[in-house]
Amino acid sequence: MLARRALRCAARRGGQRPPVRGLRVSPRARSAMPSWVIDRYGRNEVLRFTRDMVFPAIQYPNEVIVKVHAASLNPIDLSMRSGYGATALNMKRDPLKIKSLDTEFPLTLGRDVSGVIMECGLSVSYFKPGDEVWGAIPPWKQGTLSEFVVASANEVSFKPKCLSHVEAASLPYVGLTAWSAINNVGGLNQSNCSGKRVLILGASGGVGTFAVQLVKAWGAHVTAVCSHDASTLMKKLGADDVIDYKSGNLEQQLKTLPSFDFILDNVGGSTEKWALDLLKKWSGATYVTLVTPFLINMDKLGVADGMLRTGVTIGSKTMKHLLKGVHYRWAFFMPSGPSLDEIAQLVDSGKARVLSCAIKSISKHGEKAKTLVLHAEQSLKRS
Ligand SMILES: NC(=O)c1ccc[n+]([C@@H]2O[C@H](COP(=O)([O-])OP(=O)(O)OC[C@H]3O[C@@H](n4cnc5c(N)ncnc54)[C@H](OP(=O)(O)O)[C@@H]3O)[C@@H](O)[C@H]2O)c1
């Protein structure tokens, strides 16, 4: 009788169970949570809001469960919604094909998160429940457009104190991608960057705006390439020279400038054919591109042939440019709590600003999240 009354009461409250006196119902005891998921690849029609996504569980002792306060979108989310990278990501998800459920669906998109630690695995001592953290979850794991997400403790970091959750959620994925390209792959850091001439192609995007601020904070001379309407923003972020790629021949404009020590290419395509000629020869100068055929090769050719094609491509390009006295490299997003610690310091010390917007509280703003997916796609099309 009492149980039936409680259920009727729950129905009146829109499905939420009323608190039961005498029993402590911890959030961990839940089995379902709200999420945006996809059940197949396609356009925005495949996005589905559900309140019944399986509640995540800690599987390894170094994992934490984060309650998502804000999440955000990147071009990778739109590409993944359409199936980009599915072959490689599925191999990473289940390399030995031993999972009982032979599918990645329902799949939650979203890489960025800012939130609060809810539960820690047995070997996690650096964080405790209640800590405010930010992070970027690797694309082979379930994403952050959800009320809770599981991450390795190595993938999250204490949120910058000066940022709200919404502000914080817009930085980790682009910040870590820029960090990976500039620091891990390009070899630039605080102690060797001063006075170096750095060129950023696609400087007004998510990765570019952080990259400009990072190398500027390390003392580089920065040339930013973007469209005219972003030039004021670039100057505010510290760029020394700003070049509008829509006004005349970009290659010719850049050739009139002194040579560069480092180029970060966020655009790819035809830029790769001429950009390496802008580097200083035989001085360790490096070109790093974020636009690579790695995942597309695997999608088109399968794992083995895709990896072979990728290896041949990167090997031949590296050798060709090495013989001309410059370094050619590919870079990828790398999840890293320690790198986020350093990014948080830059943000808290006022050396890097946040420019994008994030989606707040997935459970309360489900429809808003879908609208933002549409807006993100439209703005990507415009660019
Ligand atoms: N390898 C990886 O792991 C990895 C990780 C993250 C991102 N990425 C890739 O890196 C690229 C940048 O990512 P993002 O998040 O910064 O994307 P984004 O926010 O969409 O920014 C791209 C920017 O490129 C600019 N742009 C377009 N064509 C250009 C041109 N010809 N010359 C100069 N600028 C141009 C656009 O600026 P305007 O509006 O001024 O035209 C836009 O702001 C994307 O292609 C993304 O797929 C790769």
Image (cartoon, rainbow, N blue to C red):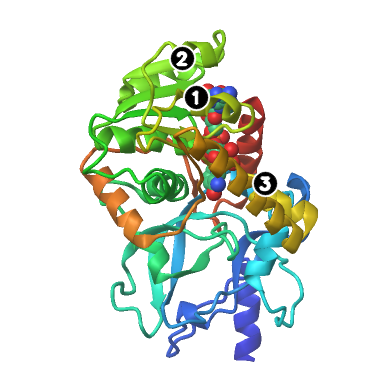
Residue pointed to by mark 2: 255
- From mark 1 to mark 2, how far is it between C-alphas? 9 Å
Q: Position of residue 331 (x, y in %)?
A: 50, 47
Query: What element does badge 1 sit on?
Result: helix
Kind of residue at disc 3: Ser
Residue closest to the eye, 217 or 378: 217
Residue pointed to by mark 1: 277
Mark 1 touches mark 2? (CB < 8 Å): yes
User: Counting residues from the N terminus, which is met first, the one under dot 2 or under dot 3?
Assistant: 3
Mark identifier at residue 79: 3
**Ligand 1 lies under 8 Å from the Cβ of mark 3:** yes
User: Counting residues from the N terminus, which is met first, the one under dot 3 or under dot 1?
Assistant: 3
Mark 2 touches mark 3? (CB < 8 Å): no
Kind of residue at disc 2: Lys
Residue at the location (40% across, 29% down)?
Answer: 281
Residue closest to the eye, 149 or 202: 202
Q: Position of residue 70 (x, y in %)?
A: 46, 53
